[in-house]
Amino acid sequence: MLSSSNYMIAKSSLSRATAAPTLSVLSSASGIPHGSSSLLRDHGDGNFHKQQKRSFLGIVHAIDKRVYRWAKGVLPPISKTENIALGCGTIGFDRDIFGGSPSLQKLIDTYQPKLSPEEESFLANQVTRLCSLLSDHDVVTKKDFTKEAWDYMRDEKFFGMKIPKEWGGLGFSTQAVSAVLAKLATQCFDANATVAVPNSLGPGELLVRYGTPEQKEYFLPRLANGTLIPCFGLTGPHSGSDATSLIGSHCVVQKHPKTGELGVVATFKKRYITLAPVAGVVGLGLNLQDPDGLLGGEGEEGFTVALLERGHEGLRMGPRHIPLSAAFMNGTVEGEDVWIPMTSILGGQSRCGFGWNMFVECLAEGRGVSLPAGSIGAARSVVAGVGAYSRVRKQFRVPIAEFGGIQEAMAKAGSDGLITIAGGDVMNAIVDNHEAPMVISSVMKQNCTERGRRIVECGMDVAAGSAICRGDKNYIGNAYMSLPIAITVEGANIMTRSFQIIGQGLTRCHPHMSDLLRALQLPPSQEKEAVQTFVKQFHKIVGHGVSNFFYSVTRGIGATMSTTFRSKKAYKSGNDLLSHHEKQLLRLSANFALTSDLCFTLGGRLKFEELLMGRLADALGAIYLGYATLHHYQRRQ
């Protein structure tokens, strides 16, 4: 990334290097001896000054071109996958934060999370009934649900909540799916995980958006009624959280040796695939290669998704993994030299190489909705269950709820719970608004799963001995053992926090950086257009930094004065409370935006400054969740 100081230094140096010889050439071309200032003054027809102006502009353009080429050479090459990732998903409120001036009123007016009467009825009846069929202790001990619970989930279409009604699903909103998952998490974390996958990263979502008519007609009704339980095979033994590497999972375009049908021959080794042991269909992420050019321009090489049913020749699904003490189904998906016809490529041949776009745009639901819903369930369990326990449990004939240490732990749990619920409501409304916010979904995943872990830890500290002895009356112990799984899956929190959030946010959500990066990626044949865009966006970035510096100072002074002289009754008025905290968040947003601009001075070194990016990710998460909490309060005051 380009440093503003480097740009100015380069421009100044090039100006000194080129100005003297250029003026010498101008003097010769006009018939004026070099250094004759009197003749310059006597030249009255104005042509010289026009020439001088044109020459000056020429110098500026030459400098801009050289700086552009220098920046192009300094910028690390952006891979095809990185380019796709930069263009996938949507930006909205996250861009407002990077801009330095987000608006609470805009957030309130744009996003209104709500449930329909049908969704409320499902939550009150079917979900309550399913919870009654689940004994968390029995599920964990036997490592499976009862047949009655499995059949009920199929019959009531728990696996098809996001599939449209026209295909036999429930057609529920994201807010409804989140509410169902959160309620299931209060009873059994394994039920939460089992229902979450088909309604987020399962092939059902991908089929609705990208499937061919034939694929939709065949798969969607079967997925909706539970005839087929889906899973998605992406992670391998050597790729882990780096889903883009697809190490050990590749396929080559070939023609069938007997029929001549076009297809691919695939070899893959997948690990940690949720629902694989019971799945009837798997979506496979493969790295497609076409060395012989058989695609003929229809589709291209790259990340491709294939749909294979259990029983497909060469497909092996198993053995089963046991993640910690959890009981949800998880296992392997493997195959060597498996023949896959083009009709089994999700979206058909034209969607070959398009898998990364599919995956990234659907990832927002898994990361931003399903996993935070588990933390919301944990928050409600701890605050309600452990809170009640602290009132009836006595020590020294005094309820332990009266002890300061207990109050501190419960206050932390309540605070993190409120923040998690508020963030989830806004995230659900964003997705229901047909957006796929990659950065906010990463913020939600990392922040909410971490807060969920802290909430359960606080509950364990308060419940103490009653929480560490396993049995059918222990309502928190299994959640405590399951939370590290949520921390790990769909991008480990360490990677998400220290690399992904800010790495993607700076390039994708900054108001001007994405256009500048695109200009630097243009081919030499488009250099003139690229230089113009580069210079224009560079000046905007500088202006953006200057304006946010001004806002940072003025808002800081204003917030300090407001805090110092505010009335003692200020917190008794809801509107005054909102106004005060919004001012604080606006100040922090300007500080964050200014710091983000200063990060560009690090250039390519920024991607190795993971401690810095982690702290910035914390700041971004705090600002987003702060606004979400004010949004939550405003809607309920």
Image: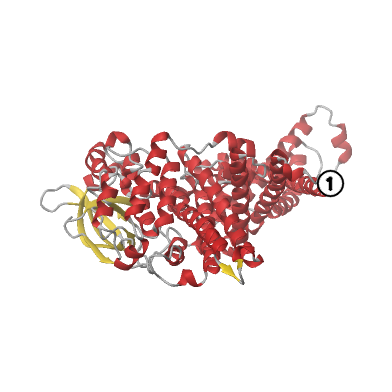
Q: Where is residue 365 shown, x and y percent of the image?
A: 43, 48
Left or right of 482 in this view: 615: right
Please give the count of numbered marks on the rendered protein: 1
Q: Nearer the viewer, residue 102 or 42?
A: 102
Residue 556 visible somewhere in the drawing = yes
The residue closer to the viewer here, 358 or 515, is 358
Q: Quadrant of the C terminus?
A: top right
Residue sticking out furthest to the left = 258
Q: Position of residue 216 (x, y in %)?
A: 26, 39
Q: Residue furthest right?
A: 38
Answer with left or right where residue 53 lies relative to residue 537.
right
- Image quadrant of residue 193? bottom left
| Residue 149 placement, left or right of 201 | left
Circle 1 sits on which residue?
A: 565
In which quarter of the view is residue 33 placed? top right
Residue 486 location (% of width, % of height): 44, 60
The percent coordinates of residue 622 (x first, y second) are 62, 53
